[in-house]
Image: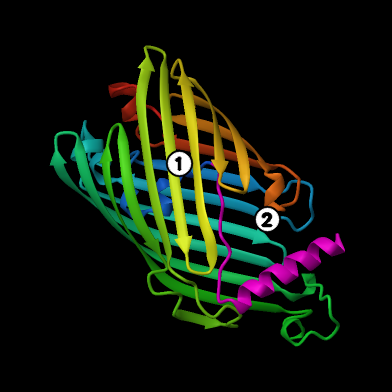
Amino acid sequence: MKKFYLSISILFFAVIGADAQSRKYTSQFSHLQAYYNPGLTGYEGSTLRGLVRNQWAGWEGAPKTYFFSAELDFAELGGNANAALLGKNAVAVNLFSDQYGPFLENELIASYASRIRINKSTNLRLGAGVNYNHLRLDGSRLTAEQGNDPMMMQYANGFARMEVLDFNLGLALTHEKYYVSYAVHNVNGGALNSGDIFMDRKPPVNIFQAGYRSKVGKQMMLASNLMYRSQEDLPDNVEFNVKLLMMDKLWIGGGHRVNYANSYQLGVLFEGFRLGYVYETPMVKSYLLPNATHELMLVYHLFGSPDRKENGLSIW
């Protein structure tokens, strides 16, 4: 276990030296569209969402992720029968907690989106979010390869805290069968910060998302999603997934994070909410720990799921 903490320490102090940040992964990214792009706030109506991710299960200090969000579409709140198309405003609160080795990162994003109707089936969505990050470093969980390492000694056997305030922007073109979106996180590069500044800046993150879904028979629906992320100090991240929904009740699917991992998905759709599970395995050539990753996700529709009732296109 000491070797594991050593690798965590070396990895993240290299990150600090490079003015970088950790990257948060979720295999079920297609269920968290509004977190990645504020322009997609309220795209699936008013919802409560929760996700738990246990990465490299069985290793002490391995990353653990918790996510919760609440989205509110004002048109649904007002009783509009076709809120998904005719609604104009939506708000959301996203909470993301990520613990990895000696680091604990809590992220709070408050976002707003406005929609412009292009035609009877398509909307242009614009969104903005305020992003607050609180990072804590537990120096008692650091292990140095070299004794009295000056970089580590300043944090050893103590706690360091850092706060960052930044902004996210996004736009999206949406239809009941497809969406295409682009967003930027950390627009200000993490320049507004306070506390123990152990991470100089947070580079902007560019995020592209797209998806398409369609009925493939009376009892089946196919959904596919793609996400691409880039920032100057980390390799590009590309991942996609495909899901087959059967009898409007059960879905199975698979996903791939290019050069890193494969995932296998199973979910159940109920009236008003859905439950999804992912089993993720790292690729051998990625040099990640061999242990599997588990994800559990729940989405609850506050006013019922309009997509299920109107066109049978139930999930992304």
Q: Is residue 14 left or right of residue 210?
A: right
Residue 90: horizontal and vertical position, in percent? 29, 49
Look at 79% across and 84% down and name the residue there: 149
The foreground one among 58 and 179 is 179
Label 2 – label 1 distance at C-alpha: 21 Å
Look at 31% across and 29% down and name the residue there: 306
**Quadrant of the drawing holding the C terminus:** top left
Amino acid beneath label 1: Ser
Secondary structure, mark 2, is loop
Residue 30: horizontal and vertical position, in percent? 45, 41
The foreground one among 9 and 260 is 260
Determine if the magenta segment contains residue 12: yes
Amino acid beneath label 2: Pro
Query: In the rendering, which numbered label is found on residue 63?
Result: 2
| In this view, 197 is above or below 40 | below
Tell me which label, 2 or 1, sits earlier in the chain: 1
Q: Which residues are the magenta region? A: 1-27
Residue that protrudes farthest toward the top in the picture: 218
Q: Is residue 87 left or right of residue 160?
A: left
Can residue 1 be seen from the camera position used here?
Answer: yes
Mark 1 Cα shell of 10 Å, populated few (<14), some (14-19), many (≥20):
many
Determine if the magenta segment contains residue 202: no
Residue 262: horizontal and vertical position, in percent? 61, 39
Can residue 79 be seen from the camera position used here?
Answer: no
**Quadrant of the drawing holding the N terminus:** bottom right
| In this view, 70 is above or below 1 | above
| In this view, 136 is above or below 4 | below
Badge 1 is on which residue?
A: 30
Residue 218: horizontal and vertical position, in percent? 37, 12
Look at 59% across and 76% down and name the residue there: 18
Number of callouts? 2
